[in-house]
Amino acid sequence: MASTMTVKVHPVVYFTIVDAFERRSNKEGANDKALGTLLGFYEKNGVQVTNCYSIPFSEQKEEAPELDDGYNQQMLQMMKRASPTEGPVGWFYTNADLSTHCLSYHDYYNRLIGEHQSAKKETPPVILLTVDTTFSGPNNRMGVRAYLRTKAGIPGNREPHCAIFNPIKVEMDAFPAERVALELIQGGTDSKQREVHLQGGIDQLTKATEEMLVWVDRLREYVDEVLAGKRDMDASMGRKLMDLVTSASSHMQPKKFENVLKNSMRDYMMISYLAQLAKTQLALHERMISA
Amino acid sequence: MLAGANVDFVQLDSLVVMKIVKHVETEQYTGMSEVGGEACQGFLTGLVAMDEHRLEITNCFPTARTELAVDDEGRERAARDLEDVKQAEMLDMLRKFRNMNIDYELVGFYQAHPFGACFTADLVESLVDYQSSVVDGVVLIYDPVKTRQGQLSLRAYRLSAKALDLCYVDWSPETVKQAGLTFENMFEELPIVIKNSHLVNVMLSELALSSTKAAEPAQLQIGAKGSLEKCMRGMMNHIDDLNRSINAYNKYAVDKTRHDALISNLTQKRQLENESRRGRGEPPLPTDDIKKMKAPTLQAKNGMLECFLAASETAAHVDHAQEVAGENIAKLFLAESVAEERIGKERSSSSINPTCNVLNELLAVAVAAESNTFALLESCGATTADVVDLELLRFAPMTDDACGRRARISTTAPPTGLPSSNHPGAAKIVRSSVLLRRISSAVAADWQWASSALSWNPLFVCSEQGMCAFYASLLTSAFRRAAVAIAYPPVGIVRNAVMFSSKRISDSHCPLASSTRRC
């Protein structure tokens, strides 16, 4: 069961982890990593990780890494009060690989989550999320992985022989509004100053239509190539195109469509007229007071 | 007195944006904001870059929800304790931030308000609190409604220096007039820039690479009817409030002039009397009793503040309504141009020239690919054009009507001077967006005209209060009538129509599929 589990990570978690890593201590002997608690909730065959925070820890002593349990507990309390639906589901670590410390950290979080889920008998699975902020993985990419620890050994033995961190699937998930915000922020990757300005609605609409045109052009190109025999036929692509065609031309009677169009247009016109009226009144009101 | 504010704009860390959005979104998800009854809010931390006149907000945290007490006693106690607890928690959190090297200077707070209508007496009070301790304190207002519609809406406000000064004195009409304060310059809005760190940019690219399913662009969806209706309702309520406060002000103004006239009358009389008394060698009468006469007061709790807040709330609703309505008109134009595209296709069946049409080509390839090879088609003796014609036959019954419409459209609005003429759909889209811009700018111009008319119209310049009030009431009654009679029913009708059309769209998949199998 466990290996089919999916970890759904919300964007705010990534942002917090990156921020935590950027704000790691630069003092002598401090760790070059960030570690913290993941918050979220369990669902059928998966975990939603919706929030997280970092905690102080120390790996100076090789065999006994330390975590600030008091800090963690207090933070947990506070987060719980701000959003009661979230509970601890695991922990994050900014490292490309799993180190020997992970075992003791994981034990700690197992205990912690066990305490917090006292109503249920069984301890739910504890997630370990690693973000490779040092780009030491293959292709120099910032890899994101999630693990579940499973015990391994000969069945029937009381003490398992070893523990394995099994990689599980990570997906990004977001609430609709989060998606909108993320899309806007993503614009910062194209800007030299790494800045984004908030956009007006009409600008956005123009941009969307322009994008649409680009895509239509690209599709045309593809279709032309297929028609000219330069490119192989692809049934799945064809089906998608078909979907596109059927959805693009709404199969509505033109008359009906015209009616709908006219009516909603009238509605919107009315609304903007009313808004205008209200604005006039505001201006009047201002004259009255300052006259 | 306070030193002036130093910052000209607000720089938000992308983390802050995401955190605020997430906080509000979870609250709505769990329905907490309805239970709790108060706006979702939290604190902002960051630092002030004095040299660049910039306020950097680098982190934030939500405030804890108040625990709901069951009985009255508990509620009272909770209210008493709440402030202390909140304060303690905030300080605790700031300490924790310091521990983790996060900026721990408090620079303001954030709140979520639908339609961005945040202007309440509470907000003013909190802002006064903040701005007296942190000179550059701001409030960030997040609008969840607009964001759900595909446009992230965050605004940074602070009280202007004038308004802040008045908060320490009072809000009586005289002081307000003297300060030259209006509802427009009461709050200052600061421009917002969102900044990503390098590592965040890397992470964003990584996310863009790994995400497989493209999100449906929310900004292209038609149908903000529900929220617009709510917005209109809110707007009407606030207009009512506004009128109430204007009436109170008018009453005050009338009383005031009457009172002033009375006083000056009495003083003059007394002076004459005193002169005659002096002539007779009698001692003059004192004028104290006249001065002691009670001056009328404005019948409102917070003086003019109430008026200003109602006006600001209305303005926020108006802006929202106008913007969303404008956008939706734009989207309708888009939808129309896409639909016209189909009509164009129908027409081309009579002139048999399928190659000039994007959708036709898409259709052809789709059909061909569906039956997997051209060879199969060719073995039946069919060519691409034939397949297309087959498809087009299905549309035949509609064609006549469509042609008429098409002709009419092309005579009324000739698409001139636009790129890619072999690309009618594209041209239409461009055209409608151009048209849209024209409409929106026309609307803006209209409004500008209205406001400038107000300023030069002699009626208004030398206006008497009564005249103005008459106009205002005229406008309100027109507004109400129009709103009640016209706005509401069609909103419902159109919603039904849209639902109907979407149903039609899903139904129409079936005949197309069967016809595909045929060929």
Image: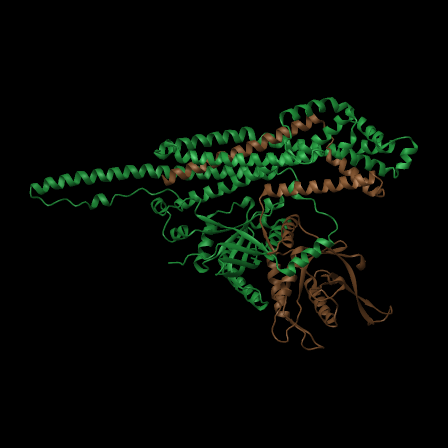
Q: Which chain is green?
A: B
Foreground residue among A15 and A101: A15
**Residue visible at 44% across and 54% down in the picture:** B128
Question: What x and y, as percent, mark residue B158?
Answer: 47, 52
Give above or below for A263 relative to B138: above
Foreground residue among B427 and A276: B427
Classify the position of the C terminus of chain B by image quarter.
top right
Please count the marks in the image.
0
Q: Which chain is brown?
A: A
Classify the position of the N terminus of chain B by image quarter.
bottom left
A75 to the left or right of B8: right
A115 to the left or right of A273: right
Give above or below for B346 relative to B43: above
Question: What x and y, as percent, mark residue B486?
Answer: 55, 29
Question: What x and y, as percent, mark residue A278?
Answer: 48, 36
Q: Where is residue B199, by image quadrant?
A: bottom right
Foreground residue among B107 and B333: B333
Foreground residue among B35 and A96: A96
Give above or below for B481 relative to B182: above
Question: What x and y, as percent, mark residue B46?
Answer: 53, 61
